[in-house]
C-alpha cells in the first residue's frame, strides 16, 4: 500500500515539474554562457564527422554527445540544451526520491523534499549550459549504490560503481580524481564495517572490479585526448584553472589581455573552445615553498567560499553538517555502522574539498545541495522524535525547511527571466551586415561579442589589447583579416578613423557601433 502511495506522489511531482518546466521554458530559451558555446560547437563537429577537432581536453564529451539527437532533429541548439537539462532534472528528482527512502526518511519528510526539488532542479536546469547538472545526476546514481549497507554482497555492485564513475568522468574530468578517492574511501569504510572475512573479501573484489570497469570506460577518452595533445592528460580544465586563478603572477584569462586570438580550428567560434591552445604560464603549488604557501591561502579562501555557497543552498546547511557531526560523535565506537549519517557526510566533505584546492563556483557544488537536502530531512526526522514538536510545530518546521532550500532557486529563476534575449535580438539586427563565417573582433565586451558571434555563426577573434594605438590596431585587424570590428561603450558621435573600414549604420542600436571592411576580397 505504501508503495502505491509513493508511486502516485512521485508521479504527481514529475508531472508538475514537467508541465511547469515546458511552460516556463520560453522565458529561458535564449540563456547563453561562454562554456555553453563550446559544448554546442563540439556536438556539431561530431555530427559533421569532424572527430579530430571534436576531441577536446577542456570540455568533457558526454554533454555534447547527449545534445546530438536533439540537433539531428533540428531542435534549435540553445533550446536543445534546456530540454536536455530538464530531462536530466527529471531523472535527478527520481534518484533523490529513491535516496530519501534509502535514508529511511519518513513519508512526510519525503513529500516535503519532493516538492522542494521542483524549484531547485528547475533553477539548476535553466541557470547555465553546463555539464554540472549531468555530473550531479551520475554521482547521485553512484551514491545510491555505494551508500547501501549491503553494498559488498554482489560483485555487480562494484561493477556498477565503476560504470557510473566512468560515465561521470566523460561528463566532467573532475569526476576522475573524485571517483578514485571516494570509491577507495568508501571501500575502506565498508571493509572495516563488516566483521566476517567473506564480506571483507567481497569488498576488496568489488573495489578491484569497480576500478577495472572504470578504467575500461575512461581509458579510451584519456587515450584520445592524450594522443591529440601529445602528453598524458586526464583533462585540461584543472591545469588551466590552477594556472589562471591560483598563480599569483597570472594576469587572468588570456582572452582579456593578449589581444586578438585565432580560434583553434576552422569551425570554432572563439579561442575559448580549447584552452590547450591558449598561451599561459603553467603553475603548480609545488614549484616553490612560496607557491605552496600561496596555494594554502587560496585553499582557505576557497573553503570560505564553499561555506558561503552552502549557506546560499540553505541557511541551515552549517547546522545540518554540525548535527551530522554530533550524531557521529554520539556513538564513536559505532561510527562505521551509522551508514545513513557517515556516508553522505564524508561524501559531501570530500567532494567539496577537491574543489577547494583549485576553484569554486556554485554550480560545481550542485550535488552537495541535494546531499544537504537529504541530510536536512534526516535531521528533521531526528528532531521530531522529541515530544517538543507538536503537529503545528512540525508543520511550521517543514515549511521553514522547504523554504530555506527553495527560496534562492525561486529568486534566481525570476531574476534570469529572458536572460540572453537582448543579445539575441541585437544579433538579428546585425545579420543584415555580418554573414556566417565572417571574422569579427571588438574593443571590449568579450562575453557579449562572443554570444553575438554564436548567433551570427561567425568567428570571434576577441578584444583588442588595452591602450592599443590606432596604427597597431589597424595592423592587428589586417593581420587577422578581420571583417567587422565592434565598438562597445563609445559615444555614437565619435568615429574611428580606420583605413579600409567604414562605419555601418545599425537601425535602432546605440549600444554598439559596427565598422566593416569597405571592400572584401
Image: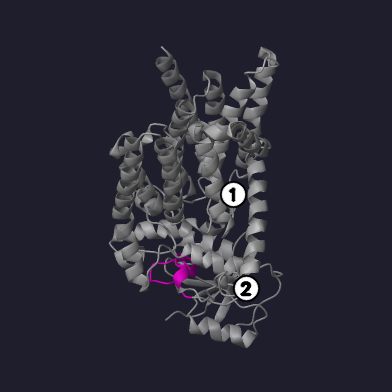
Horizontal arrangement in the rendering, residue 201 relative to residue 423 (left or right): left
Q: What x and y, as percent, mark residue 497? A: 64, 82
- Residue 129 in view here: yes
| Membership of 269 in magenta stretch | yes
Q: What x and y, as percent, mark residue 158? A: 33, 42
| Part of the protein shown in magenta | 262-276
| Membership of 228 in magenta stretch | no
Q: What x and y, as percent, mark residue 469? A: 65, 85
On screen, 465 above or below 34?
A: below
Residue found at x 30% / y 47%: 209
- Residue 84 in view here: no
Foreground label between 2 and 1: 2
On screen, 85 above or below 217?
A: above
Which mark is first along the chain, 1 or 2?
A: 2
Q: Nearer the viewer, residue 164 or 40?
A: 164
Q: Main secondary structure of the magenta part?
A: loop
Q: Nearer the viewer, residue 439 or 83?
A: 83
Q: According to the image, label 2 marks what residue? A: 289
The image quadrant that residue 157 belongs to is top left
Q: Residues within 10 Å of mark 1 (few under 14, many from 20)?
A: some
Label tally:
2
- Checking the image for residue 362, the label placed there is 1
- Checking the image for residue 282, the label placed there is none
On screen, 352 above or below 230?
A: above
Q: What x and y, as percent, mark residue 472? A: 60, 86
Q: Quadrant of the C terminus?
A: bottom left
Q: Residues within 10 Å of mark 2 (few under 14, many from 20)?
A: few
Residue found at x 66% / y 39%: 318
Amino acid at each position: 500500500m505504501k508503495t502505491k502511495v509513493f508511486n502516485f506522489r512521485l508521479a504527481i511531482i514529475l508531472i508538475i515539474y514537467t508541465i511547469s518546466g515546458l511552460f516556463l521554458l520560453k522565458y529561458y530559451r535564449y540563456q547563453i554562457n561562454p562554456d555553453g558555446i563550446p559544448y554546442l560547437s563540439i556536438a556539431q563537429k561530431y555530427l559533421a564527422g569532424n572527430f579530430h577537432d571534436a576531441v577536446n581536453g577542456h570540455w568533457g564529451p558526454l554533454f555534447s554527445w547527449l545534445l546530438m539527437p536533439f540537433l539531428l532533429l533540428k531542435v534549435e541548439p540553445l533550446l536543445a540544451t534546456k530540454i536536455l537539462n530538464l530531462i536530466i532534472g527529471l531523472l535527478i528528482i527520481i534518484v533523490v526520491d529513491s535516496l530519501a527512502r534509502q535514508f529511511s526518511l519518513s513519508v512526510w519528510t519525503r513529500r516535503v523534499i519532493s516538492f522542494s526539488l521542483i524549484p531547485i532542479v528547475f533553477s539548476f536546469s535553466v541557470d547555465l549550459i553546463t555539464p554540472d547538472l549531468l555530473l550531479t545526476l551520475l554521482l547521485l546514481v553512484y551514491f545510491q549504490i555505494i551508500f547501501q549497507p549491503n553494498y559488498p554482497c554482489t560483485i555487480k555492485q562494484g561493477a556498477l560503481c565503476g560504470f557510473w564513475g566512468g560515465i561521470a568522468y566523460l561528463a566532467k574530468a573532475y569526476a576522475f580524481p573524485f571517483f578514485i578517492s571516494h570509491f577507495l574511501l568508501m571501500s575502506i569504510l565498508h571493509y572495516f564495517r563488516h566483521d566476517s572475512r567473506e564480506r571483507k573479501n567481497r569488498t576488496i573484489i568489488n573495489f578491484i572490479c569497480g576500478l577495472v570497469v572504470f578504467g575500461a570506460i575512461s581509458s579510451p577518452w584519456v587515450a584520445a585526448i592524450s594522443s591529440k595533445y601529445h602528453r598524458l592528460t586526464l583533462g585540461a580544465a584543472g591545469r588551466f584553472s590552477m594556472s589562471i586563478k591560483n598563480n599569483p603572477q597570472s594576469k587572468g584569462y588570456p582572452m582579456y589581455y593578449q589581444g586578438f586570438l585565432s580560434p583553434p580550428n576552422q569551425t570554432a567560434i572563439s579561442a575559448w573552445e580549447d584552452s590547450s591552445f591558449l598561451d599561459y604560464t603553467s603553475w603548480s603549488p609545488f614549484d616553490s615553498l612560496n607557491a605552496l604557501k600561496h596555494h594554502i591561502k587560496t585553499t582557505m579562501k576557497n573553503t570560505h567560499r564553499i561555506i558561503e555557497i552552502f549557506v546560499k543552498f540553505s541557511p541551515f546547511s552549517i547546522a545540518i553538517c554540525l548535527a551530522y557531526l554530533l550524531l557521529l560523535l554520539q556513538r564513536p565506537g559505532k561510527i562505521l555502522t551509522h551508514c545513513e549519517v557517515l556516508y553522505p557526510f564524508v561524501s559531501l566533505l570530500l567532494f567539496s574539498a577537491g574543489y577547494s584546492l583549485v576553484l569554486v563556483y556554485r554550480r560545481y557544488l550542485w550535488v552537495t545541495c541535494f546531499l544537504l537536502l537529504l541530510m536536512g530531512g534526516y535531521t528533521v526526522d531526528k528532531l521530531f522524535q522529541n515530544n517538543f514538536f507538536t503537529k503545528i510545530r512540525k508543520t511550521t518546521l517543514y515549511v521553514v525547511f522547504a523554504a530555506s532550500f527553495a527560496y534562492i532557486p525561486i529568486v534566481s529563476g525570476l531574476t534570469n527571466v529572458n536572460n540572453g534575449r537582448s543579445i539575441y535580438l541585437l544579433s538579428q539586427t546585425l545579420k543584415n551586415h555580418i554573414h556566417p563565417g565572417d571574422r569579427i573582433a571588438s574593443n571590449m565586451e568579450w562575453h557579449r561579442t562572443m554570444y553575438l558571434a554564436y548567433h551570427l555563426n561567425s568567428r570571434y577573434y576577441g578584444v583588442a589589447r588595452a591602450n592599443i594605438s590606432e596604427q597597431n590596431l589597424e595592423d592587428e585587424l589586417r593581420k587577422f583579416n578581420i571583417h567587422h570590428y565592434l565598438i562597445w561603450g563609445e559615444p555614437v558621435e565619435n568615429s574611428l578613423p580606420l583605413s579600409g573600414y567604414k562605419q555601418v549604420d545599425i537601425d535602432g542600436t546605440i549600444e554598439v557601433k559596427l565598422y566593416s571592411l569597405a571592400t572584401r576580397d
